[in-house]
Amino acid sequence: MKQNKNMPYVHVDTQHEEDRVNAVASHVEDDRLDEEPVVKMEHSIPFSKVLFFDNSDFHYGGQGYESKRANLALEIESKYYNGIMGIGGDFFDNANMESATNIYGMRVSPSNAMAGAKAMLEKYKDNLAFFLGGNHDSAWGNRNKSSNIGPEEELARSLGVPHARYSLVMTLNLLDPDNAKVKKMTVCLKHEVKDPQKLIGYLAKQGIVPDVIIREHTHNGNDGIFMTTVPVYNKDGTLKGYENHQVLVLTGKSMQNGNTYYGAENNFDLKTNAKGLMLSWDKNPYYTADDVTQPRYIPKAVPFDVLHKTENKPSKMAKILMHYYERPNIEDYKKNTKDMSLGQVASSYDAINRRTKKKLESFVNYEKTKNMGE
């Protein structure tokens, strides 16, 4: 620590800058192939819609962490049978204790938070599909260095959850809108994405064409559609032309609530929340068989809050989706159907589907009407 001459009561932490300089020198010495290694994984979802939950910026044990709502969000997400849930970047508030970033106002240090964090996530480890690193994750200059493991990666390994330090590309094998065949959707998650178009170009150089990009950290950023061109070839390898490929760029929602100076400055909601995405394929109305520029299907994402904005309960959309996609309790199912014939079970299931579909359509129409009125 170094005293500031102009302000005698203020001390400056110079260690952080020294660590950064040393990390840059170490960075140059590395024999690396890629600046940011990309971890890939694949999931087969036998449905046309998937509920995707990226729980980012918990800042566990730090200023603004709200335990009750964070736990409630994970509990709700784990109930959907077509859901994919994971932990985004910055799970701990300050995994690199040598850094001066956001150390003031912390409730517990990561070394003490590890036990509580593991107990929190242990019951969801079979539901968690990924664990992503963030800017609070580990020490400077750790790229491609297997010897430098931050607390988030240590926690992920102990739970048996796949961990990606920088970029994660997930291939979702979804059904097309007609439920006739599988149509792959490529989802890229990255904690910090300052320029989505540059990331799209970086992925393209590695043969990856994203359909959806989920960026965290920039919590007050806007969702949007970016475009890139993809070459289309005949079966004999002849270039037919270039497809205008849509990429949905979606901004995550911080689990760190707005009861912080940082939160207030960035206009967070006043309560911790998680953002869900209902991902699916939609038919492109401009598609024709003879126009190679227009794809047959385009990615579709319907964002929604997992929690009610002010109360500790599921949001209205989360409750409606629960009726439609809730993971059945096998014991209740056995009890309720043990005396039914196969035809009765099928009729009962169809009746449930009709009711929940009607509720969902009614809610969507209500939201459209309300937004038009605004």
Image (spheres, rainbow, N blue to C red):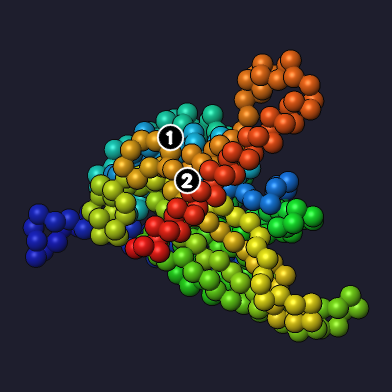
- Relative placement, left or right, of 363 versus 219 is right
Disc 2 element = helix
* Residue at figure coordinates x 79%, y 55% from the top left: 180
Mark 2, residue position = 317
Identified by mark 1, the residue type is Leu
Give above or below for 305 relative to 5: above
Position above or below: 323 against 237: above
Task: Give the left or right position of residue 257, taking residue 299 as reference.
Answer: left
Which tag is nearer the camera, tag 2 or tag 1?
2
Q: Residue at x 62, y 25 (%)?
A: 329
**What percent of the width, then of the height, locates residue 38?**
62, 60
Residue 12: which quarter of the image?
bottom left
- Residue kind at label 2, given as amino acid type: Met
Q: Image quadrant for the N terminus? A: bottom left
Q: Which element type, helix, strand or loop, lies under badge 1?
A: helix
Residue 233 locus on image (x, y percent): 82, 78
- Above or below, 119 relative to 29: above
* Residue topped by disc 1: 72
